[in-house]
Amino acid sequence: MDHSLLDSNLDDKDALLNQMILNAAAEDPNLLSSLQKQAIPTTVVVPTPGFCLKTKNSKNEKIFINLCTAEHVPPPQDLSDDDLLKLLESEDPTGFRIPMSIGEPHAEIDKSGGGCTAYDVVVSPIFMEKMKGSELFRTFFLTVMMEGLEEKYDMQLSREWIMLKNRRCVGTIQEQNMRTQSKPFIMEMGQGTESPVSTASQNKLIQEVPSSKEDLKSRGKEPEYRIIQEPAEGHPDFLVAEINLPQVKVCGSISLDLGEDRILLQTRSNIYYLDIYIPYYIVQSDCGAQFNRKTRILTITMPVQPSS
């Protein structure tokens, strides 16, 4: 089962974009007003330590993970233990995601005086309290969080972790930049992993919208895509967009923004560009996306607002 259901609040390219804007503005102050419109809205947060894990990487080096909280991180959907168990046992466990912010590694000294590396992972205070009262949610989150760290920093971590009893953190908790506006997460699915949305949509396909072949030279080529709705008749509960991106290798190359009735997708180096309107209003805060590295297909799941 794939547990990589994380929602990172600010990725590396957002921070890089903001820094480029600040550098350009320093050289030419007249550019600041126009460039600010392109900046990702963020705020600097000093997380509050919660508890600390000790583990090791594949090189047998000590790794400490400081689990912290910040009010700017939204809580996940409120589920009971029974609801989570049912979700994990289902064929589609991707309906539950845990928003978190994974910080940069920082070198520290452990209690024996030896060198170590610490990472700060930030979640909602509400979810932190949830984990304190539920071993199931705590174990699930730690599994998700470990996979997120491994993917972001290309490393392997031992699952034989130890929760420190007398220390809430190791080293100094680092400041983090976090978005002040939500943005749809993109979950990258590994080789050989099939998208559950794609599988379901093969059974109930109601409408297919073929893409244009027009090459938008200035902004990139419009990719092939299709949009399907569920249920097949009447007002849909949700829409699913499947976008074919054969020249994209990792989800970090994709920038995705969803409006109430609009999909805007861009990719690094202007390989692809898609700007389309959809025939229903969607619930932006509940949308999610998965990128399958094997098929190179981005699947966007969009709950639809009820009809008035």
Image: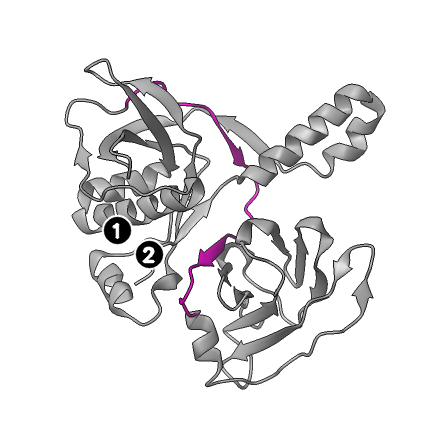
The residue at 29%/56% (across/down) is: 79
The quarter of the displayed image where residue 107 is located: top left
Q: Residues within 10 Å of mark 1 (few under 14, many from 20)?
A: some
- Which x, y percent locates residue 59? 28, 35
- Which x, y percent locates residue 28? 82, 22
CB atoms of marks 1 and 2 within 8 Å: yes
Label 1: element kind: helix
Q: Residues within 10 Å of mark 2 (few under 14, many from 20)?
A: some
Q: Is residue 32 above or below residue 7?
A: above
* Residue 98, disc: none
Residue 156 among magenta residues:
no
Marks 1 and 2: which is nearer the front?
2
Q: Give the residue pinned by disc 1.
A: 140
- Our reading of the magenta stretch's main secondary structure is loop
- Which x, y percent locates residue 36? 73, 33
**Left or right of 254 in this view: 53:** left
Give the residue furthest to the right. Answer: 30
Which amino acid, by three-letter code, is at mark 2? His
Q: Is residue 221 above or below residue 106?
A: below
Q: Is residue 235 above or below residue 102?
A: below
Q: Give the residue pinned by disc 2.
A: 3
The residue at 42%/60% (across/down) is: 190
| Quarter of the image where the C terminus is located | bottom right
The residue range painted magenta reads 170-194
